[in-house]
């Protein structure tokens, strides 16, 4: 490595002392960028006990810019060590950005390695007629091998626009790769010429040569582009199972979508074979809050399916403008979540590692709790014996209410008045409230209702938290989280 490159990498490595520069909204147990801008989780995996998270990273400007892959590792999914930028846009095939992708872990010659796949984004020189949707953009599928996530081998282009269906636009991206029965499979998100989102499914025997196996979409148009697809199977341990296709659709219009974020992330359950004939069931949001996009899952070595999302959304009114920008950084990941299947429902809950971080327990008395001064907390509310409405206030400006079979997350008069398409309130149907878990960090709140069947997340910038529960008949416990 050249001295100049080493110097640049050193400049990007922020040690513990760097935390002071992140300001009051620095997250304690959520992955955030050392400096600059972060978006999608990429290449999530675990190798010999160590968790690797790569991320869409633009270190030079907290408001965004050309994308590369940052790399962090963790032993517990909550404390992350930043290693530097692993993939720079330094080749003709990725010169406008190292876009999102994934990692496949495999053993070759007795050594484990990560096979990284990403989209090499190339915007051709601007010329009349390039609209960067139908013309003017290359979406190269690039393969890179690394053992430690830092040093990597050559970048190999395994697919170009010429390998995608001719009736797709040049928006094809975000390869997610996995292995099934000795074969490698890959999903990519795509935008058809008729502005119809779909997922392309490819198969390969050697990771270098890929053939298109199927195109998966809905019978009626569901947005113009599906970003960041993901596919995995869950079983409930009692004979029940589900095939899950996750996508981040852009361009959902009409009805309820008007009152939501500009783009959504969710999943379809799938009947049939994703590489052949299949049908998609209803779409469910991964998270119905204000800040959640482009999640990715991976299988941990103990078999858990873990999901991490980006707590941010492209093209929102607040895009590029969060209060953290003044401290030189923007955006973070969600808390990693275990995804499970129970009673036919997909659930998410914060990884169990969080429990080991709990400190300072306070329990409610007669359904009432009032605690001030925590900057990171974990609140668990058993509402099964609750006799009335449930109200949880996190600070003056953010409250959760369960009333008349609905759960709401609402901001007060001033805080984040421009959140989520100008809305400051979300109401979600929830006929019965069994339990509620709220996980707060310095600048985020994540809500998991009914064992995570409904999740709502938001970035939030409180002066300080004051957690108040008013839920007659319910039991609530609040812990601090050590960070
Ligand atoms: C989703 C996304 C991806 C793309 C990446 C670029 O947020 O637009 O589709 O690969 O971000 O940063």
Image: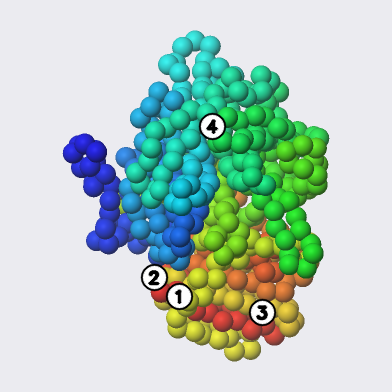
Q: Residue at x 51, y 46 (%)?
A: 103
Mark 1 or mark 2, which has the lower sequence index? 1
Front position in the image: 63 or 14: 14
Q: CA distance from mark 4 to mark 2?
A: 42 Å
Helix, strand or loop status at disc 1: helix
Residue 208's label in the rendered image is 4
Among all residues in the image, which is located at the extreme top?
128
Q: CA distance from mark 3 to mark 2?
A: 25 Å
Bin the neighbour count of mark 2 within 10 Å (Cα to Cα): few under 14, some 14-19, many 20 and up: some
The quadrant of the picture occupied by the N terminus is top left
Residue 483's label in the rendered image is 2
Mark count: 4
Q: CA distance from mark 3 to mark 1?
A: 20 Å
The answer to the question of whether label 4 and label 2 lie on touching residues, with beta carbons closer than 8 A, is no
Mark 3 or mark 2, which has the lower sequence index? 3
Q: CA distance from mark 1 to mark 4?
A: 43 Å
The answer to the question of whether label 1 and label 4 lie on touching residues, with beta carbons closer than 8 A, is no
Helix, strand or loop status at disc 3: strand
Residue 38 rendering spot, x and y as whole percentages: 43, 46
The answer to the question of whether label 1 and label 2 lie on touching residues, with beta carbons closer than 8 A, is yes
Mark 2 CB lies closer than 8 A to ligand 1 = no
Residue that badge 3 annotates: 382
Q: Residue at x 77, y 43 (%)?
A: 273
């Amino acid at each position: 490595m050249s001295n100049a490159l080493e110097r640049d990498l050193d400049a990007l490595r922020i040690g513990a002392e760097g935390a002071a520069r992140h300001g009051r909204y620095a997250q304690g147990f959520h992955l955030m960028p050392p400096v600059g801008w972060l978006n999608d989780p990429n290449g999530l995996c675990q190798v010999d006990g160590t968790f690797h998270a790569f991320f869409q990273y633009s270190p030079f400007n907290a408001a965004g810019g050309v994308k590369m892959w940052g790399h962090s590792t963790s032993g517990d999914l909550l404390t992350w060590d930043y290693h530097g930028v692993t993939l720079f846009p330094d080749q003709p095939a990725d010169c406008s950005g190292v876009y999102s992708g994934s990692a496949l872990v495999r053993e070759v010659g007795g050594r484990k390695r990560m096979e990284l796949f990403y989209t090499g984004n190339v915007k051709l020189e601007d010329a009349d007629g390039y609209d960067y949707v139908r013309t003017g953009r290359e979406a190269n599928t690039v393969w890179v091998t690394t053992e430690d996530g830092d040093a990597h081998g050559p970048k190999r282009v395994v697919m170009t626009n010429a390998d995608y269906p001719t009736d797709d636009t040049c928006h094809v991206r975000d390869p997610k790769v996995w292995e099934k029965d000795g074969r490698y499979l890959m999903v990519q998100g795509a935008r058809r010429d008729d502005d119809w989102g779909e997922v392309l499914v490819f198969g390969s025997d050697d990771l270098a040569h890929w053939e298109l196996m199927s195109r998966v979409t809905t019978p009626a148009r569901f947005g113009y582009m599906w970003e960041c697809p993901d596919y995995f199977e869950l079983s409930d341990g009692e004979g029940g199972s589900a095939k899950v296709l996750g996508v981040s659709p852009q361009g959902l219009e009409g009805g309820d979508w008007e009152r939501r974020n500009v783009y959504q992330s969710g999943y379809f359950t799938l009947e049939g074979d994703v590489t052949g004939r299949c049908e998609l069931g209803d779409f469910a949001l991964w998270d119905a809050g204000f800040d959640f996009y482009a999640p990715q899952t991976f299988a941990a070595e103990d078999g858990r399916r873990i999901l991490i999302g980006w707590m941010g959304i492209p093209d929102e009114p607040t895009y590029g403008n969060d209060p953290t920008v003044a401290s030189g950084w923007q955006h973070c990941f969600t808390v990693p979540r275990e995804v499970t299947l129970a009673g036919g429902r997909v659930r998410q809950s914060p990884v169990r590692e969080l429990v080991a971080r709990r400190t300072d327990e306070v329990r409610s008395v007669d359904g009432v709790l009032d605690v001030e001064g925590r900057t990171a907390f974990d609140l668990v509310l058993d509402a099964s014996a609750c006799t009335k409405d449930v109200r949880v206030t996190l600070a003056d400006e953010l409250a959760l209410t369960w009333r008349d079979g609905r759960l709401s997350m609402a901001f007060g008069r001033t805080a984040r008045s421009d959140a989520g398409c100008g809305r400051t309130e979300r109401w979600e149907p929830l006929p019965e409230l069994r339990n509620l878990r709220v996980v707060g960090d310095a600048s985020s709140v994540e809500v998991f209702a009914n064992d995570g069947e409904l999740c709502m997340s938001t970035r939030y910038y409180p002066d300080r938290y004051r957690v108040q529960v008013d839920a007659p008949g319910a039991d609530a416990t609040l812990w601090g989280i050590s960070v």
